Image (cartoon, rainbow, N blue to C red):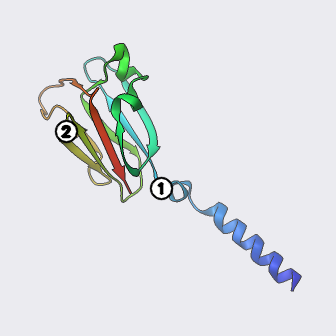
Amino acid sequence: MKFSIAAIASLMAVTVSATPLEVRQSNQVTVALSNDQSGAYAGVTFPADDTDRSIFALFGGTSVGAGGTVKATAAQLTSFAQSINCIITNNGATIGTLTAQKTYLDLDGSSHAAIPINLNHARIHCRV
């Protein structure tokens, strides 16, 4: 009896440790902002827990938040669960949605120009 309990416990420990890290931490998402005019780029990881988050609070201390203003031309998912859904709003208006199928978002809405958008009052809401 002792052998079978020890064998089962060992098997369970191996199974848990063999689970891919992305499955065990599937509630984490990494979103990157880039500013094609300045060359600034920053990625931030946070829980995709169905909570509104301030983009200024997330990115204010990064290169895209230099000078006290978060300015970016694009947003991109760089690490995410397959069921991820992130909505970016600015001053209450939806800019766009990022999903596992649509991982890149041109924030200014123009594919012909790189116009940095002020995101100091923007929010991101991600859920798995």
Q: Residue at x 70, y 66 (%)?
A: 14
Give the crowd class for mark 1: few <14, some 14-19, many >=20 residues within 10 Å.
some
Q: Is residue 75 left or right of residue 60?
A: left
Q: Position of residue 12 (x, y in %)?
A: 70, 71
Q: Position of residue 27 (x, y in %)?
A: 46, 53
Residue matched to label 2: 92
Q: Position of residue 106 (x, y in %)?
A: 21, 36
Q: Are marks 1 and 2 in contact (CB under 8 Å)?
A: no
Q: Position of residue 100 (x, y in %)?
A: 32, 54
Q: Which mark is residue 26?
A: 1
Quarter containing the C terminus: bottom left
Quarter containing the N terminus: bottom right
Q: Element type at marker 1?
A: loop
Quadrant of residue 18 in the image? bottom right
Quadrant of residue 16 in the image? bottom right
Q: Element type at marker 2?
A: loop
Quadrant of residue 104 in the image? top left
